[in-house]
Amino acid sequence: MSTEAEPPQALASDIVLYPPDNRRLANLCGQFDEHLRQIERRMGVEINNRGNVFRVIGLPREVAAAGRLIERLYQTTSEYCHRNASTCTSSSLGSANCSRTRRPRSA
């Protein structure tokens, strides 16, 4: 019988953001997904997305925290775009690309 604890298993969790809004998604993801990459680095997770569907991969605690953060940030984009409707346009976002996905690593 081994007394070593088994390493935690990676978990994948899907998050669907509603209502789907390309301007809000572009604000959430950042230009070339820079905001998502920052969340990945800070929280130790991997984030893949296609449109309004996000998959967060990592350890269960970090996946849950990153999922909550993504949902909260998406809500914040609604408040921002509502208050700043004249400046929250796709043209003001430059070449933001929020639909790029990366090849998932084995979970």
Image: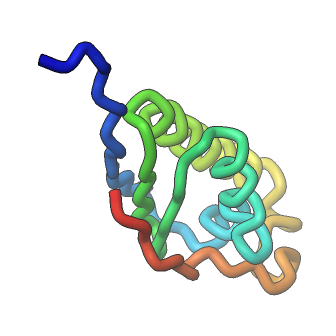
Q: Which residue lies furthest to the left in this view?
A: 1
- In the image, residue 31 above or below residue 3: below
Could you say which quadrant of the image residue 29 lies in?
bottom right
Count of labels shown? 0
Residue 70 as seen in the image, left or right of residue 55: right
Q: Which residue is drawn at 58% across and 37% down?
A: 69
Q: Residue at x 70, y 49 (%)?
A: 41
Residue 12 as seen in the image, left or right of residue 27: left
Quarter of the figure with the C terminus: bottom left
Q: Which residue lies furthest to the top in this view?
A: 3
- In the image, residue 24 above or below residue 90: above
x then y, percent, for residue 40: 64, 51
Q: Which residue lies furthest to the front in this view?
A: 1
Residues 97 and 55: in front is 55
Residues 6 and 18: in front is 6
x then y, percent, for residue 5: 30, 20
x then y, percent, for residue 85: 78, 62
x then y, percent, for residue 48: 49, 66
Quarter of the figure with the N terminus: top left
Q: Which residue is drawn at 75% across and 52% down?
A: 38
